[in-house]
Every structure is written in C-alpha cells, then in structure tokens.
Amino acid sequence: MQLLRGLGLFVAITCLVWVGVLWHWQATQRDMSPQDILLYLGALPVTVFVLGVASAWALRGVSTRTATASARSDLPSAATSTPTSAEAGHDRVQLLLAHAVSGAGGTVDDVLQAAQAGAPRPVLDTELHDAQGLPVLVARVGEVDAASLAQELESLQAGLVGPASVAASLDDATFRALALLTTQLEPTIDALAAWPERLGRPAETLRHTAAAVRTRVRVLVAWPAGTSEAQRALLQAWLDTWLRTHAEGVVAPDAWLLHATTAGSGPELWLEADRLLAAMAREEQDDLVLLAACHSDLDAASIERLEEAGALFCATQPKGCIPGEGAAVLVLAGAHWPPAKADAPFAPHLHRAAIGRRDKAVDAAGRVGSELAQELLRQSLAAAGVEAGTLAGLASDADQHSARGPEMYGAMLAQLPDLDVGEDLCMAGQLSGRTGPVATLLTVAMAAQRCAQTQRPWAALSVADPHWRLALLARPAPAPAPHPATAATDQAVHDDKTAA
C-alpha cells in the first residue's frame, strides 16, 4: 500500500512539473535542446519528488517530538514532580481494601474472572428503549433498592437549610448509583473493624493513651456526573450521616473527615487523593484515605441524553458508549500500616500514579494517538523503578468497539512489548459498559488483586474518560523491616554465639 501511494505521488508530481515546464516553454517560445528535455522533464520531477518526501519525513519527525513534549507537559505536577523528603511517604501506599460492583460482577474477583472468560456481555434491556422504541444494549447490575434511598434523602433534606427541591431533582439513575455505593461501603466498614485500636477508640479515652490524635478516615467521593453544586452538598451531608450511623462501633464518629471534591473522573479523583496524601506526609499524619465513586446510566432520562448527544451505542453509532452502572470503594493506607492479622501479609503497594489529560477527546473524529498513554506508562514504570520486562500483566478499562481500545493497545505494545495480549491483559470496559469514575478505581483494584495473586508487579491503565488518563503500578509489599528492638536482640544473640 505504501509503495502504491508513493508511485501515485510521483506520477502526480511528474504531471504537474511537465504541465508547468511545457506552459513556460510555450509562453516564452523557447527552442528546446535534448539537454533541456532531459533536465526539465526528467531530472526536475525526480528532484521535486525527493525533496517532497524528505520534507514530509522531517515534518513527521517534528510533529512526533511535539506530540511527545505536549504529552509530557500535560502531566500535572503530581505525576512529574520529584517528591521532597517530606513527601516521600506517599510515593508508595497500600491498597488496604477494595470493593467494587459493575455489570461484569459483584466483586473485584468476579470482574477479573469475567474479563478472563470474556463473559458476561452487555445485553438488550427489557426496560430501556431508544427513540425508535428499540431495546438498548446495557450492562445492568441487577436488583437495586433505590426507593428507600430516595426517601432517606428527602427526610435528610427536610432537616437542612436550603431549597426543598434539591432531593427531588435527583434522577432515578443517581439513586441507583447511590444505592450501589452503599452496597460497597457496608463490607468496607465491616473490614475496618480489624483495627479497633486505631479507629474505634472512644474520644474520651484519648486523653489516657500515648497517641494524642486518633487515626482519621479521610473520604473523597466522585459523585455521578451532572450533579449540581447543591446536589453534591446534599449528597455529602447524606454520606456523612450514613457513615457515622452505619459505622458506629467500628469507626469513632469523629474519625470520619469528608473532603469536598468536584472530580468528575477517576483520574481527577486520584489526583486529589495524591495531593491529600502529600499533605498528610508533610504533616506526618498516618490517616486512611477512602476513595469512592458511583455511576449509573440506567434510566430513561440518561438514555435520552446520551442519544441526543450522539454518544449512545447503536447501529448508526457503533463507537458509542454502552450504558452501565457501578460503584467502587478503595481504602489507601501508609506503607507501614499493619495487616488485619499479625501473621497476614501486607496488602499490595501502589506506586505514585502518572496522570495526564488529552487535548483531543478520544471520541472526537479523526486519528486518535496513544502518545499520552505511552508517556504515562513510561513514567509509572520509572516511578516504581521497575523494568517493563518484569511485569506480569496489565489491567485496563478500555473497551473493544471505540477508539479507547486502539489507544490502550498502542500504549501496551510500545511500553510493555513483553506482555501477551491474550494472556496478560485484563480488560473490563466492554463488560462493565460506561461507569464514569468507577472505571478507574475498578481498574486499579483489578491490578492490585492480580498482583496479590501472582506476587508480581501489575500495571493499571485507565482510558475510560474522554480526556483524562491514569497509569500506575501495583507490586507485592516488600518484606517488613525488623523492629529496632528485635534487631538489637538478634544482634546480641549473634555476638554471644560468635564470642562462644
């Protein structure tokens, strides 16, 4: 194909040169010698063709370097800056807990198994239809109790200062997303009961303990897309009340600390968490960071909005999104946070993420490059100090029908050439459908879970958002360093044996 294109270009250039030369000769009534014919009709077209090809190669090289430089400059400071000694504590954190649900499965393990088996696939929904009355292909979780949650929010709204219509303005899809979020918060709270001495001490006992400050649980949530500022404020108040009520006896009520966030995507949420971890490291605070996200497209209004925007997957839009829903909760802890049981291994460690934003949306018309994703993968490898050949696999939220797939494959082939696409890739985007910020958290959880199972490093690459991208590495926790007192005792025993 390249040869035919080159031949066609040469013929076109030759014709243009001949037309120009012959017209000039006729206009000037010049007598042509054999040397003129050979020079102007033979050598000149070849020279113009060679110069054109050389110029094209030069421009292509400049554009490639510019794209790479642009990709690097697009990375926020959290992805590119060299941490100071005060911030070094958050270069590696434990993924202490991870709970997630989507149309692909009810747990992270279920999603991994579905991704490896290639099933289940999104199905035609019996409740939702497009403008033509045809059923829509969706990735539905199943039965969700959203009605009781709607009543709970309305009751909460009645006791708050503000317009009474805020709770009523939330659509059915948002209530489904919130209900899914509660199903993931419940097992998270149950798991936090393993650290009662850090999280569950009553406030009055703090005055009689060596620790002056109890460990806090700092909460960052990416709410469903499209929620207004007033709606987010209501949801923040609801979550604060819900956590204090349902975690009673596990986490002290005043240990919860909710941070307001406007993150609309998973990478943006992770970027805010990175900044929070950096601030905690500077202040030497050993708090937990709980990241949560929820999303649902499964109501008539959401389907209508997607269809009006031309973003709904259908026969006329084969690259559109498949409506989905899900929720995810991750708990991050410092590298030295103790396991739930004394003899249990440490949780997988996550290295500092590389995060960047595409200038051109992945769904826009035209060619979609993978330069930014490649650069983020390269930076995540450098941040972890890991060679690409040592990775066991890659987890991603890319799908197989839009430009996200080629973008992910391009980055994988460029930066992780030793991985096998069929054996070493876990891709859940096609199974879960569109899950908004949940996709990034689920991707990180998948990579960490496979890391724990294989005891080898795994990479996570999130490309679900139209613009934002994230890459990070999960690796097994290193062997814990011996306690200073234990090390001194061992050294004394060794010295006694040597003296004897």
Image: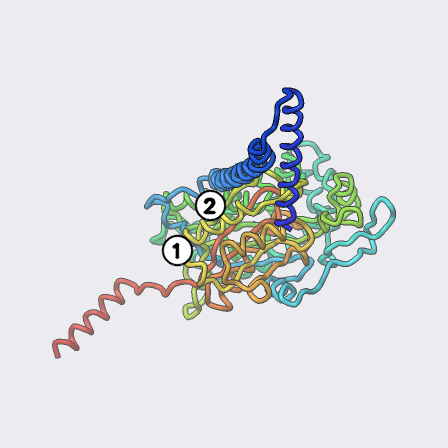
**Residue carrying label 2:** 274
Residue pictured at 41% horizontal, 68% vertical: 342
Q: Position of residue 166 (x, y in %)?
A: 70, 36
Q: Residue at x 57, y 67 (%)?
A: 423
Of the image marks 2 and 1, the number of the one nearer the N terminus: 2
Residue occupying the point 50% across, 45% down: 355
Question: Of discs 2 and 1, which sits in the foreground?
Answer: 1
- Residue depicted at 62% across the width and 32% down the height: 17
Look at the numbered disc 1 and give the secondary structure of its residue.
Answer: loop
The residue wearing badge 1 is 385
Task: Depth check: give the residue in front, 449 or 19.
Answer: 19
> What colour scheme was applied to this rendering of the protein?
rainbow
Total numbered labels placed on residues in the image: 2
Q: Spatial distance from mark 2 to mark 1, Cα to Cα?
A: 19 Å
Whether residue 437 appears in this view of the structure is: yes
Q: Residue furthest top?
A: 28
Instruction: Indicate the quadrant containing the C terminus: top left, top right, bottom left or bottom right.
Output: bottom left
x then y, percent, for residue 191: 53, 61
**Image location (x, y in percent) of residue 90:** 41, 49
Q: Position of residue 28 (x, y in %)?
A: 63, 20
Write down the quadrant of residue 227 in the picture. Answer: top right
Q: Nearer the viewer, residue 338 or 293?
A: 293
Which three-letter amino acid code belongs to the residue tagged 2? Answer: Asp
279 in relation to 456, above or below: above
Q: Which of the 4 image quadrants contains residue 361?
A: top right
- How would you rate the neighbour count of disc 1 (Cα within 10 Å): few for under 14, some for 14-19, many for 20 or more? few
Q: Residue furthest left?
A: 499
User: With 249 as the anchor, is 307 left or right in this view?
Assistant: right
The kind of residue tagged 1 is: Gly
Residue 336 vertical position relative to residue 151 in the rendered view, above or below = below
